[in-house]
Image: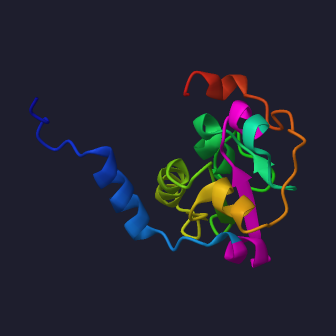
Amino acid sequence: MTRPAGARSVDQILDDARARLVRLTPAQAHAEPDALLIDIRPAAQRAAEGEIPDALIIERNVLEWRLDPESDARIREATGYDVRAVVFCSEGYTSSLAAAALQDLGLARATDIDGGFVAWRAANLPTARTVTPQALPADPAVLGRS
């Protein structure tokens, strides 16, 4: 099978995304006072693995709409382009792609947690077994864009 001209592998896309990020260790993310921790894992993963207390739940399929300061579907925390969005997923792969997408929106301080929730838990940082229901229900205006 021949890759089409201009196509990149997922590993190349991930490497490019991470080259733009200053990724945080779990301890750094926990200690950063202005970090807006954002859990992009689906509900099933949160139920199986647990959660970080006080992290915002914004599933990956609506992340850009919720954090774009100019979006009609933005959350109240999306106050401007200087928001320190620190995204995490289970192991830190999807979150790197998501953080790079947030930088593409102009959120230059966006990054992710190296190793994701698994690394956070391994560092013995606060976790909860209680699963938060989807805190940010899908906006009908965004559903067609997922």
**Colour convention:** rainbow
Q: How many marks?
A: 0
| 130 vs 13: above or below | above
* Vertical arrangement, residue 95 with respect to residue 60, above or below: below
Q: Is residue 29 magenta?
A: yes
**In the depicted view, which residue is nearer to us: 46 or 143?**
46
Question: Is 102 left or right of 33, judged from the image as shown?
Answer: left
On the rendered image, what quadrant is the C terminus found in? Answer: top right
Q: Residue at coordinates 13% horizontally, 36% vertically from top-left?
A: 3
Q: Position of residue 46 (x, y in %)?
A: 75, 40
- Report x, y in % for residue 76: 81, 51
| x 32%, y 51%: residue | 11
Quarter of the figure with residue 2: top left
Residue 54 in the image: state x and y as whole percent: 87, 56
Say which quadrant the N terminus sits in.
top left
Q: What are the residue bounds of the magenta stretch? A: 27-46
Residue 34 can be seen, yes or no: no
Dividing the picture into quarters, in which one does residue 102 lie? bottom right
Q: Nearer the viewer, residue 68 or 115?
A: 115
Q: Is residue 74 above or below residue 43?
A: below
Residue 32: x and y in percent read: 75, 77
Against 141, residue 89 (above or below) is below
- Whether residue 83 is visible, yes or no, is yes
The question of residue 113 being in magenta is answered with no
Q: Give the residue displayed 63% in from the left and 23% down from the top.
A: 143
> Which residue is depicted at the point 69% across and 39% down?
72
